[in-house]
Amino acid sequence: MDALSSTFVFPLSHTKPLPSPITTTKTSLSPPPRLPLFTVSSIINEISTSKNYKPSTYPSKPTSKQSTPLAPQPARPVKRSLPAIIFKTFDDIINNFIDPPLRPSVDPRYVLSDNYAPVDELPPTECEVIYGSLPSCLDGAYIRNGPNPQFLPRGPYQLFDGDGMLHSIKISQGRAILCSRYVRTYKYVGERDAGSPVIPSLFSGFNGLTASAGRVAVTAARVLAGQFNFVNGIGVANNSLALFGGSLYALCEHDLPYSVKVARDGDVVTLGRHDFDGKLFMSMTAHPKIDSVTGEAFALRYDAMPPFLTFFRFNSDGTKQADVPIFSMTRPSFLHDSAISKKYAIFADTQIGVNPVDMILGGGFPLRSDLTKVPRLGVIPRYAKDE
């Protein structure tokens, strides 16, 4: 499961020996007898629990060692419209009586406990160097992506549905700046302004026919009332990061990429949802393959409707090339990843399938294993114009 992905963005390489080691956590002022050559640890302990959470609602899983939750900050007041109040009431009825999170695997009190507990944003904050010094030749950033819901989920919850948050450490001129920011997706901004969750969980929100019908009805009413528009995307940009075409993108499997950057002051900025001049349709994989020699990026899109697989690439300048639909894929499959060689692209058609109908009628996770299916490998030239 890759609910977490990270990227190094270092324009300069080490051109001279590194100076003495450093650490940025306050464990002890006296240095240990031996340290690794270069150590940077972040100041995550300074991040408080998200302002929208009450720690008392998140009991830790039974362990021998219980951690003390941090005090929450006061929530930002939001003035809700009458339609928003009505929609929230129907949501509460569905989540409390029709489809409550009965199983621990989808109960946010357990899914979002311990190491997965939500955290707040952190503005650019300098890490104190306790021992040694940062090498002056090091100039760049390490940035990490992962799910971090901004609001307490009211119904069944799966980690894949958490809003994308970027954690960055920018090292430059002997200083280290830590910053944590949400990706400003359409979903995040809309729900922030509404003061509560609006878009239902794709991975756990359609659990059986009754719950699905109720959530689809509320969602349709929200669309008709203008509360959100599917055309603007419902993705969370929480899955991975990719650097190609001179830009850095936060990605998830069911939306377009969001362009982001680390500013000079260490802040993490969302530049916007990117469709590559209208050439990228709806979504793309969160794991494009970048050729380090040519600078090209190779990607795919898989769907629940034909064509079930589409292959495409980006030039080194970020220009998207034409789609190559793969019609020999005759049923939907979870093509989470792929590979490239100097001449070919390789896809794995595994026994993990995507079946939304089974999820809605039978309940459960949308990805299902089909042991009767024969796994296949698809091989296509990197520059093919058709399959």
Image: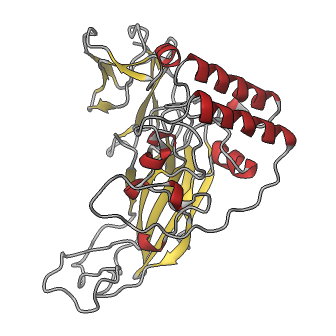
Q: How many marks?
A: 0
Image coords of residue 225 (percent x, y)? 83, 32
Instruction: Give the quadrant of residue 18.
Output: bottom left
Residue for point 32% across, 44% down: 293
Instruction: Name the residue furthest left.
Output: 33
Q: Nearer the viewer, residue 99 or 41?
A: 99
Q: Is residue 42 visible?
A: yes
- Residue 264 seen in this snapshot: no
Classify residue 246 as left or right of residue 343.
right
- Residue 384 versus residue 42: which sits nearer the camera? 42
Which residue is located at x 56 percent, y 29 percent? 99
Nearer to the camera, 178 or 343 = 178
Horizontally, residue 325 falls left or right of residue 205, namely: left
Q: Specify the farthest residue to the bottom.
A: 30
**Left or right side of 287 for 20:** left
Which scheme is used to colour this image of the protein? secondary structure
Quadrant containing the N terminus in the rendered view:
top left
**Percent of width and height locating residue 92:** 67, 37
Quadrant in which the C terminus appears: top left
Which residue: 24% across, 75% down? 38
Q: Kindly indicate the quadrant of the structure image that contains residue 211.
A: top right
Percent coordinates x, y for residue 61 in the rendering: 36, 52
Q: Residue at x 74, y 48 (%)?
A: 194
Tell me if 208 is positioned left or right of 21 in this view.
right
Q: Is residue 220 above or below residue 267?
A: above
Outermost residue, right side: 82
